[in-house]
Amino acid sequence: MAPFFYLPLAIRHRSFQLAMHSSLFSSPAYRFDQIDTEMIDLPDDLDPIICDQAEGSTLVDTLRRFGFVQPLPVWQKTDSRYQLLAGYPYLAAIRSLAVSRVPCQILPPHTAAITRFLLQIQHGLSAVLSSPVLQAHLLHQAQQTVGEEEVLSLLVAMGYKPHTYKV
């Protein structure tokens, strides 16, 4: 199997740059490390069908051939548990390859909810920008966790013009 390695995250969208300059966004203090795949959890309320969409064997074949080129973004919930923030199909594919440890971008437990949501939208492994289902799921989570102004900033990060009636 090819060695697992990662590349730095790139800011892909102008809307994310605007959101970063907002008073709502605090720069995350993250670190990179290898984590046991069994310590990584999917969000509790995420439909398993979304998580298992590893695009058939194509994703598994790609990982087998090239390795993992970007770290999984995770939020540290406890000392030994992490919640996956993006790249849901990758976790299933990695586990199917019997890879026990994977490179991760780890956000500390005190990371603000809005920062976690923005990372979910903008991470290179995220399917949120291309999936209306994941966009709706993320906005639903955000409505239960953060204020209206922050939810509207997430719409900007998704490339929408924020309007209160869209929330």
Image (cartoon, rainbow, N blue to C red):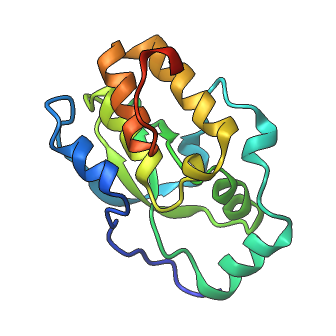
Q: Is residue 9 left or right of residue 98?
A: left
Displayed quadrant of residue 92: bottom right
Q: Quadrant of the N terminus?
A: bottom right
60 up-or-down from 29: above or below? below
Q: Specify whether residue 46 is in view.
A: yes
Q: Is residue 102 left or right of residue 97?
A: left
Residue 28, percent from left and from top: 22, 44
Residue 155, percent from left and from top: 43, 34
For image coordinates 54% across by 53% down, the residue present is 126
Query: Of 166 and 68, which appears nearest the observer?
Result: 166
140 up-or-down from 49: above or below? above
For image coordinates 79% across by 74% down, the residue present is 58
For image coordinates 49% across by 76% down, the residue present is 69
Residue 60, percent from left and from top: 75, 72
Query: Of 123 and 83, which appears nearest the observer?
Result: 123
Residue 30, percent from left and from top: 25, 50
Q: Is residue 82 left or right of residue 38?
A: left
Displayed quadrant of residue 93: bottom right
